[in-house]
Amino acid sequence: MKRIAPPLVSFGLCILVITLFLAVSTPSPLDTLGRFFSGTFSSWWYLGNMLNTAVLLIPAAIGSAVALRSGSLNLGGEAQLYAPALVTALLLSRIPDTVPVVPVFLAVLLAALATGAVLAAIPGILRVRFHASELLTSFLLSAALIPLLDYLVAGPLRDPGKNLLATRAIPETVRIPPIAGPSSFNLSVLPILLLAGFWALIILRTRSGYRMSMTGTAPEFAVFTGIRTGRITVLGMTLSGALHGLTGFLAVTGTWYTCHQGITIGMGWSALAVALIAGKHPLAIVPAAIIYAWIQISGDNALLSTRVDFDSTAILQAVLFLVISARTIPTIVQFRRKRP
Amino acid sequence: MNTVQNATLEQVSRVFVSRTDRSPAAARFVALDAVSLSFSRGELHMVLGENGAGKSTLVHILSGLDTPTSGRILLDSQEVAFDSPADALARGIAMVHQRPLLADDLTVLENIALGGHGFLVHRKKILPYVEELATRWNCLVDFYATVRTLNPADRLRTALLCALYTNPSFLILDEPTAILPPEKRASFMETLVTNANEGMGLVVITHKMGEAARWGHRISILKHGKLVRHMDQKKSPVSEADLAEMIASPSEKSPRQRSSDTAVSSAFSDKTHCTLPLTISGLSASPPNRQGIHNISFNADPGGITGILAYPGSGLDTLEDALCGMIVTDAGSITLPGRENTGVQLDAASLTPALLRKHGVAFVPSNRTTRGAYPDISVRDALLPYYSGPFTPHGADRFAEDIVRREDIADHPFRPVRTLSGGQLQKLILSRELSVNPRVLILSDPEWGLDVASVVRLRNRLRETAAAGIAVLILTDTPDTMEVDDFFTRTYTLREGQLT
C-alpha cells in the first residue's frame, strides 16, 4: 500500500485540480463533470483514442525511465520525439510504390530510432566528457531544435497540396492498421506491451539492469566495484532518445499519418511525468500511462463544453510536476553531490 | 536556557521494515527491543555493546535522527517527540558523529557560527567564546582552516565545537576516541569527565571496555537490541575484565562450518597461485585540498599480511584512493601478480577500479557506507557486483542469501544496507570481495567500528586468506590496535605522504 500511495495521491490531486477548473469555468458544472468522469467510456472513439495516447506515451516513458535509472534526467524528450517523427514522415512519404513495404518500414523505423538516439547521446557524451549537466544540455538542445523543426514542417517540407502545416501524408501501405474503428487505437499496442515487459525483464533479471540501477542509485559504489558508469550514462541517454524516437515514429505511422507542426503536443514532458510517477517498479509505467492518458483525454473532452479555452494537458503536467518534483528533487540533489 | 536535567527513554523499540522491488513480504529487523534508560546531567554515561547491538540506533533516537517504532522519550518527565536532529538540539540534546557532516568549503569558525541564533553572523564577536570553549574542551583547531583540509581528528574537534556552541544540556559522542591519535585519547576522556562533573550530561558510545571502566560514571551494555546491564560506577565499580565477561556471548560461536555447496567458492583450491608480490613503485598523487602522497614504493608478498601504518592526516586516504583507482595519480606504476606466475605492470595513471578488478584485486574500502555499499540499496544488491550467474530468484537471490547466512547476519537479503551495523556491513563487503578468488586483497581501516570479538574474527580470517596464497595489504591510521602477535609480516609507516 505504501508503495502505490504516492502515485495515487499525485493522480488524485490532478483530478481534483482539473475538476475544480472545470466546475468554475462551465455554465453547467454537473454536465461537464459527468463528461469528465464517464465521457471517455461512452464510445469506442474516446476509449480508443485514450488507449492510443497511452500506447504512444509508453515507449517515451520507458525512455525517460531508462535515463532516470542510469542516473540522468533527459529533458529533451520533445525534440527527440519531433525530429524522428519528421524523419519518418519525410522518408515514408517519398518512397516509390514499387519497393517492398516491410523492409522499408523497418529501415525507416531504424532511422527514427537513430535520430532520437543521436539527439540524446549528445548530452550524455557531454556529461561524461566535460561534466556538463545533461539536464541543461538536453533541454537546450531540444529547445533550439524545435523552432527549426517547426520551420521545416511549415516551410520547405510542407505538403503544397494541403492547407495544413504538415508534411505530405504517408501512403496507406505503410500505415499501422487500426483495431478500434475510427479511433486511432492501432496494432502497435502489441509490440509496445511486449516492450514494457521486456524493459521490466531487463531491470529485474539481467546484469545490465543491475548495473544500470547501481549507476543511478549508488554511483560511487558502482564505480568502485568496477562498473563502467560513463558508458552506462551514455548508453542510458542513447536508449532514452531511441525510445522517444519510437514514439515519434508511431505517432506518424499509427496515428496522424503525417508530421504536422507541434506533433509532440507536450508528449515528451508527459512521458517524463509518467516515468517519474511510475517510480521504481518498471512495470508500473503501463498503468501510470493509462491513468495519465485517461485524465488527459477526459479533460480535453470535458473542456469542449466549457466557455474557457484551455488545455488540460498543461494543467495535468503542471500539477504532476509540482507533486513529483517535491519528492524527486531531494534525490537528484543528493545524487549530484555524491557523484565523485 | 536549557535546563533539562534528565533524558529518559521508556520502553523504546525500533523495528526496521523494508520492502524492495522484488520481495513480496516485508523484511523486519528489530534493532532496539523495549529499552528503558535514563541519562542525567553531570554524568559521563558510557554505552557499550557489540556491532549491531543497537548502540547507534539508541543514540540516533535520542538525538532526533531516527524515531522509535514504539516507546516514549521523556525530558524531565515530559514526553517529547523529535522529528529531526534540529528538534532535539532545540531541547538541548546535541550529537557528534564519528565522521561528521560539515560544510566542507567553509572555515572551522564559520561552521561553528552556523549553529548560532539570529540572522547575522559576527565572526569576530563569537571568537572569544569559541576560543574559551576550545580551551575548556581541550580541542584546539585552526579556526581559519577550511574544513575540507582537516584531518579526521580535527574534523571531529570541529564538530564537537559546533555542538558545544549551541550550549547543549546533553552531548552524545559516537566513539570519539577511535579517531584521535592514541596519545591524545586519555586527555580527551579526562576533559569529558571534567565537563561532566561541571554539569553537562555526556553520553559516549564505545567498544573500548577499558575506557568505559576507567572513565564512565555509568555504564550500560546493549546486546541484540536489549539493555542487558546497567551499572553505577560510583556505587559499585566494575573493572575492564568484568565488562569483558559481561559482553562476551555465553557461547562464542566457533566460526561456522562453511557449506561447500554454495555458489561462492571460498576454498582456494586453485594452488597455482602467483608467487610474485604486489609491487608499487614511485606512486605520487596530489589531489586538491588533501594531503598528497609522494614517491610511494612498497611490496606486498603473497601469503603474507603487509601493513601500511599511518599517522592520522598523513595522506592515507589519498593512498587508498590512488590504489583503488578512484583518483587520478601523477606518476608511478603498479605490478600485479598475474595468473601464470607473470606480473602485470600497469601505469598508475591509467588505473581504474574496473581494470584492477579484472586483474584480481579485491578491495575493502574505509568508506563502507557509500563506496563499499550504499544505504539505499538492498543487501542483495550490495553483494551482487561480481556475481556472474543468472539474475533470477534461484541464482542471484540464492547467492546473496548464502553469503548472508554464512556471515551469520539476521534476516533476509532484501533489507536495505542502511539497517546493517558497521560491523555487519564490513563482514559482508569482505565476504563479497573474497568471493571472486582475488590474488590481492587490500583493506583500508578494516577494524574501524568493530568490537573486540569481530576484530578477532577478522584477524583470523585475514590470516586464513593470506595462508591461501593471497597478498593481503592493510592500510590503517589506528596502528596501535593492530600491532599485536606479529599480525603483520611486514610493515611500512606513512608519514606526511611518504613511506619510511
Image: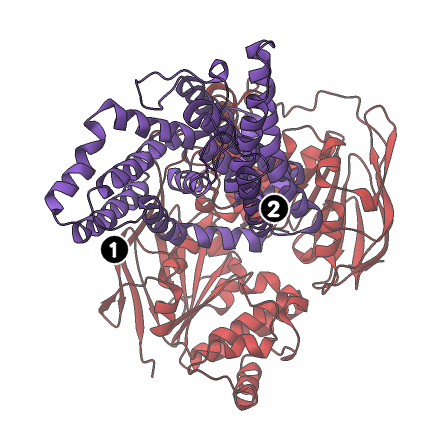
Extreme residue in the front direction: A161
User: What colour denotes chain B?
Assistant: red
Displayed quadrant of residue A100: top right
Q: Which mark is residue B319?
A: none
Q: Nearer the viewer, residue B252 or B278?
A: B278
Give the left or right position of residue B60, taking residue A166 as reference: left
Q: Chain of mark 1?
A: B
Which element type, helix, strand or loop, lies under badge 2?
helix
> Who is closer to the viewer here, B494 or B482?
B494
Q: What label does residue B71 carry, if any?
A: 1
Q: Quadrant of residue B4?
A: bottom left
- Does residue B255 appear in this view? no
Chain letter, purple in picture? A
Q: Is residue A220 above or below residue A179?
A: below
Looking at the image, residue B181 sits to the left or right of residue A68; the answer is: right
As drawn, is A329 to the left or to the right of B32? right
Q: Note whether residue B175 is visible.
A: yes
Residue ID at (39%, 51%): A327
Q: Which residue is mark 2?
A: A220
Q: Chain of mark 2?
A: A
Q: Quadrant of the N terminus of chain A?
A: top left
Q: Position of residue A220 (x, y in %)?
A: 61, 46
Q: Nearer the viewer, mark 1 or mark 2?
A: 2
Q: What type is the residue that disc 2 sits on? A: Glu
Q: Position of residue B479 (x, y in %)?
A: 70, 56
Tags 1 and 2 both on a single chain: no
Distance (Cα) linking label 1 and label 2: 37 Å
